[in-house]
Image (cartoon, coloured by chain):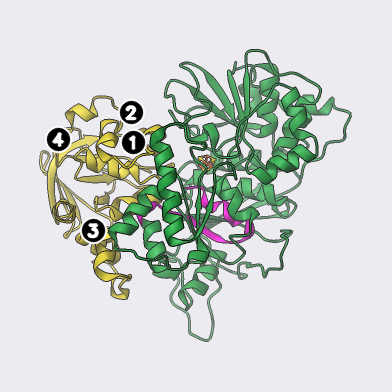
């Protein structure tokens, strides 16, 4: 960082998590601001970015993947294919995988980011590159994960390396206990609202504090996921309290590590939040938009479509019926999530309430198919972006919220606060 | 493709400015519904269509897009700079860029240049001088220094994009890593 003269070799300077992980992948200690070429542990492309990456790889003269065991292709953005053009792009990806190796996740397996974490394709301390902007989601498992475009990804396939500027880090300390009905999504929306859509541009974020230590893996993914909405290069969640089904050595920052900024927030008085059209940082308390009629509700995306998210929606909708003028669409984050939700009865509760299940994958999040709103319609979604046109129609409005708020709104036919509904439930309801 | 890319990334570019505001996201540069294709002409037809439906008609080859802060935020879609390039845009100048857009633009050989506060208006003639690191408003006679570009980026731009760079070198050259031009 500017202003910090290089230290003596024997006194190693205190490092952030980003600096530590990148140092390990460059082979020498690196500091924020340096431009480095780093070795990559894993690379992922989707059907939205893979076809262009394949073309770039071929144009580079690529004959073989640098390490097929570390290359993952996921068909998730437009699955099953809505037209022949996309059907052929999927075919192109399958043929590439058959020739080159690597692992391809077929239609219906789930959303790329969910699969990389669920299948332990990405692990703590790793440097992972994904051709998708929500790759920072893997900061939930203590990995430095960065989103790139197709040509960058092709370069990783060829060389196993990426050039990066070591980012400065913003540290966010979240203290206190989340009130009942307030979720990791509200936390993420609060931060995006506070820092803005360019609040962490070119920077890394470290999330820490007692509110983070108690979060489930799914909730950690929700928080890390929306680092992208602040423009961050990566979002690293403090591994304290992280539970994974395999042994790992967590990477913590050194005491005295240099931060570009430190923000401290008390989360114990947080209320349900909503991002209003057309920007994820137009965040307001749900009470300010209660009563806004909605036409479509969507629970899905790499932000909020895991088991705890579906369970939360089921808690709101158990034994009830959604409003007759609302379509409630649900796309589970993965087939595994869908099966777990089938086994514990969550799917049945939601389906009986009137929800329509669509295949595990991105679904309407990106506006290609499966739920494009009509002109003048309002949508409430558990996704991460509400830019104009995001869901495929620039004349529709999108509100972003937690699955609890989305479910409550589907029930009422207008944006609604889930807390009173949950409080009237007999079942004890505890969210971590 | 190599030569035209090379020409587009010459050190000095002169063109007409089209000026837009802050936080133009990739959905507004090219809506997601058009990006699942490898046909670039198709992309150019829809460039900026929700933001400025007439842009497509007005843009001339060699024009320069000028924007405020955080240009290209949102998705990682490389189709965003590709659509601009396919429509004839020769360079993008902004107060700041979303990082993936910035990488993507350089990787496909579309110069992306950061400058400070400016008084450039649509229709002004601009000169982007990559070697000197300045943007000149020829209409107003004003000059804006650009944020220096890392050497590796200039090397990639000079090659006409990352594809050409790697086709030539097979790997990153460590000499390109450090320092300003
Ligand atoms: S769910 Fe939405 S935000 Fe997540 S990867 Fe898919 S399209 Fe992108």
Q: Which residue lies furthest to the right in this view?
A: A426
What residue sits 74% from the left and 33% below the top?
A: A347
Residue under numbered circle 3: B157
- Towards the viewer: A45 or A239: A45
Specify the segment rendered in magenta: A133-151
Q: Is mark 1 on a helix, strand or loop?
A: helix
Q: Earlier in the sequence, mark 2 or mark 3?
A: 2
Mark 1 in CB contact with mark 2 (< 8 angstroms): yes
- Name the spot of residue A30 as percent of width and height, x first: 46, 73
Q: How far apart are marks 1 and 4 (CA)?
A: 17 Å
Q: Which of marks 4 and 2 is nearer the N terminus?
A: 2
- Name the spot of residue A405 as percent of width and height, x first: 67, 29
- The 10 Å Cα crowd at callout 3, few under 14, some 14 to 19, many 20 or more, is many
Chain A colour is green
Q: In this view, does A390 lie to the left or right of A304?
A: left
Q: What element carries label 2?
A: loop
Q: Earlier in the sequence, mark 1 or mark 4?
A: 1
Q: How far apart are marks 2 and 3 (CA)?
A: 28 Å
Q: Is residue A212 above or below residue A257?
A: above
- Name the spot of residue B38 as percent of width and height, x first: 32, 42
Q: Distance between the residues labelled 4 and 2?
A: 18 Å
Q: Residue furthest bottom?
A: A10
- The 10 Å Cα crowd at callout 2, few under 14, some 14 to 19, many 20 or more, is some
Q: Which of marks 1 and 2 is nearer the N terminus?
A: 1
Q: Is the C terminus of chain A in the top left, top right, bottom left or bottom right quadrant?
A: top right
Label at residue B51: 2
Cβ of mark 1 under 8 Å from ligand 1: the answer is no
Chain letter of the residue beneath label 1 in the structure image: B
Residue under numbered circle 4: B60
Mark 2 in CB contact with mark 3 (< 8 angstroms): no
């Amino acid at each position: 960082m500017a202003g910090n003269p290089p230290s003596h070799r024997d006194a190693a300077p205190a490092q952030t998590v980003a600096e530590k992980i990148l140092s390990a992948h460059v082979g020498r200690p690196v500091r924020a601001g340096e431009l480095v070429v780093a070795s990559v542990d894993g690379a992922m492309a989707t059907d939205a970015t893979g076809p262009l990456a394949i073309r770039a790889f071929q144009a580079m003269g690529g004959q073989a993947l640098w390490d097929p065991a570390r290359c993952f292709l996921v068909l998730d953005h437009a699955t099953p294919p809505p037209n022949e053009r996309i059907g052929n792009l999927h075919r192109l990806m399958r043929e590439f995988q058959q020739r080159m190796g690597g692992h391809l996740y077929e239609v219906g397996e789930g959303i790329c980011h969910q699969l990389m974490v669920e299948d332990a394709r990405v692990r703590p301390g790793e440097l992972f590159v994904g051709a998708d902007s929500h790759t920072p989601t893997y900061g939930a498992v203590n990995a430095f994960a960065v989103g790139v475009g197709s040509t960058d990804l092709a370069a990783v396939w060829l060389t196993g390396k990426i050039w990066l500027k070591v980012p400065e880090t913003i540290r966010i300390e979240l203290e206190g206990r989340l009130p009942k009905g307030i979720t990791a999504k509200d936390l993420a929306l609060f931060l995006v609202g506070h820092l803005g859509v360019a609040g962490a541009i070119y920077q890394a974020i470290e999330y820490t504090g007692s509110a983070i230590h108690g979060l489930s893996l799914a909730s950690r993914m929700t928080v890390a996921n929306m680092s992208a909405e602040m423009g961050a290069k990566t979002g690293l969640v403090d591994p304290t309290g992280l539970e994974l089904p395999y042994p790992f050595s967590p990477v913590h920052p050194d005491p005295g590590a240099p931060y570009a900024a430190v923000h401290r927030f008390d989360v114990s008085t947080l209320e349900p939040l909503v991002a209003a059209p057309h920007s994820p940082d137009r965040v307001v308390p749900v009470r300010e938009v209660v009563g806004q009629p909605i036409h479509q509700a969507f629970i899905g995306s790499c932000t909020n479509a895991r088991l705890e998210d579906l369970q939360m929606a089921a808690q709101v909708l158990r034994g009830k019926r959604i409003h007759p003028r609302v379509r409630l669409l649900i796309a589970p984050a993965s087939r595994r999530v869908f099966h777990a939700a089938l086994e514990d009865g969550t799917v049945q509760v939601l389906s009986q309430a009137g929800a329509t299940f669509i295949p595990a994958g991105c679904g309407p999040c990106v506006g290609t198919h499966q739920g494009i709103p009509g002109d003048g319609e309002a949508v409430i979604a558990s996704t991460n972006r509400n830019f104009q046109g995001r869901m495929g129609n620039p004349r529709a409005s999108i509100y972003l919220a937690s699955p609890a708020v989305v479910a409550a709104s589907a029930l009422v036919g207008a944006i609604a606060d889930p807390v009173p509904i949950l409080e009237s439930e007999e079942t004890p309801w505890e969210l971590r | 493709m190599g030569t035209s890319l090379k020409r587009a990334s010459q050190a000095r570019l002169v063109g007409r400015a089209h000026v837009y505001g802050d936080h133009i996201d990739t959905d507004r540069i090219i809506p997601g519904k058009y990006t699942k294709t490898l046909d670039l002409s198709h992309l150019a037809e829809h460039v900026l269509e929700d933001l400025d439906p007439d842009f497509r008609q007005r843009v001339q080859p060699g024009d320069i897009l000028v924007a405020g802060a955080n240009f290209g935020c949102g998705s990682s879609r490389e189709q965003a700079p590709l659509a601009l390039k396919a429509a004839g845009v020769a360079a993008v100048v902004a107060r700041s860029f979303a990082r993936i857009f910035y990488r993507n633009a350089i990787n496909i050989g579309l110069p992306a240049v950061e400058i400070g506060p400016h008084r450039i208006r649509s229709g002004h003639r601009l000169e982007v001088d990559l070697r000197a690191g300045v943007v000149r408003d020829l209409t107003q006679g004003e000059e804006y220094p650009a944020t220096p570009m890392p050497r590796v980026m200039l090397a990639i731009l000079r090659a006409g994009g990352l594809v050409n760079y790697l086709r030539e070198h097979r790997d990153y050259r460590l000499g390109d890593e450090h320092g300003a031009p």
